[in-house]
Amino acid sequence: MHWSELLVVSAVSLGAIAVMMAGTAIWATRVNRVAVVDVVWGLAFAVIALVAGFVAQAELGPPESDEALRRFVLLLVVTLWAARLASHLRRRSEGHGEDPRYEKLMGGTIRQVGIGPAVRKVFVVQGIALWVVSLPIQVGAVEPVRWPAFVWLGVAVWLVGVVFEAVGDRQLEEYKALPKGQKPPVLQTGLWRWTRHPNYFGDACVAWSFWLIGGLASGWLPALLTVVAPVAMTYFLVFATGARLLEQTMMQRPGYPEYAARTSMFVPLPPKRG
C-alpha cells in the first residue's frame, strides 16, 4: 500500500472536513438550526472525493487508466448521490425548526445552549464520522485497482441504494401530501410494503458501494482496513441514530405495531401473512 501518500490524503481530507464543519457551525448559529449539518453531510463526501483525487495525483503523478477510471467513477457516484440527498434534505427542512433529535441531544436549540455544546456533541462527532465513513474513498484515490470487477459490482449496489433512497423519499412525500381524510394511518405501499425504512436501507447500500469501489477493488488489505466504514454506517442507520430510534416514536402511531409485525424493519423482504 502507498502508506505515505494515503497519510497525506487522509490528513488533507480531515482538514477539509474541519473547514466544512466550521462553516456549517456558523451557518447553524445564524439560522438557529443544527440540523443543517444533514444537508452538508452528503456534499462533504463529494468534496473529499474531489480533494483526495487531486492530492493523490500531486503525490503519485498521473494515474494509470484503471486508476483514472476508478477515480472518475468514485467522484461521479459520490457527487450524484450527494447532490440528490442534499437537495432532498434542504427541501424537506424548509420552514421547519430544529430537528427534535438534535434539540434533545444538546438540551435545547443552539441559541439556548451556545455554540460549545453544539460543536462537541454534533459537529465534532459528525466530522469524525465523515472521516471514517469516507476512508474507502480516500484509499480508492491512492491505491491501484487490483480487482476491477468489484468497481462495477459497487456501481450496481450504488444504483440499488440510490433507487431505494429516491423512490422511498418520493413515496413518503406523496403520502404526507395526501388530504387528511384520504391518508391512511401508516404508509405501507410501494417500497414501504417490503421494508419499514427503504431510505435507510438505500443509504446503507451506498456506504457499501463506496467500500466495494474504493476498498475491496484495491485488494484484500485495503478492504480489511476500510470495512469499518460501511459497518459503522450500517450500525448507525439500524441501531444508533436511524431506524431503531425512529421506531420508538412510530410504535405509538395507530396501526404501526401491526404494520411492523408483518414488514421487515430494514432489509427488504416479502411481507408476512396474517
Image (cartoon, grey):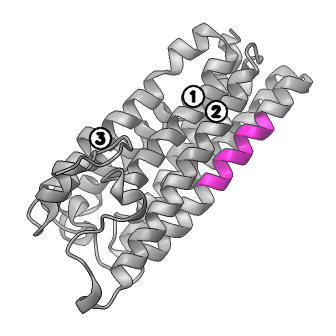
Can you identify the residue that label 2 sits on? Answer: 154
Q: Is residue 58 visible?
A: no
Circles 2, 3 touching at the beta carbon (< 8 Å): no
Measuring 23% from the left and 91% from the top, which residue is drawn there? 181
Label number found at residue 211: 1
Q: Is residue 142 visible?
A: yes
Measuring 57% from the left and 16% from the top, which residue is drawn there? 223
Can you identify the residue that label 3 sits on? Answer: 238
Decide: few, some or many residues near mark 1? Use Cα within 10 Å; few <14, some 14-19, many ≥20.
Answer: many
Left or right: where does residue 117 sit relative to residue 16? left
Depicted 19 relative to depicted 61: above or below: below
Does residue 14 belong to the magenta stretch? no
Element class at badge 1 = helix
Name which quarter of the figure residue 12 lies in: top right
Q: For marks 2 and 3, give the CA distance.
A: 21 Å
Does residue 74 belong to the magenta stretch? yes
Q: Which part of the image, by quadrant, shows the N terminus?
A: top right
Element class at badge 2 = helix
Q: Nearer the viewer, residue 79 or 109?
A: 79
Q: Earlier in the sequence, mark 3 or mark 1?
A: 1
Circles 1, 2 touching at the beta carbon (< 8 Å): yes
Over which residues does the magenta segment extend?
71-81
Left or right: where does residue 170 sit relative to residue 63? left
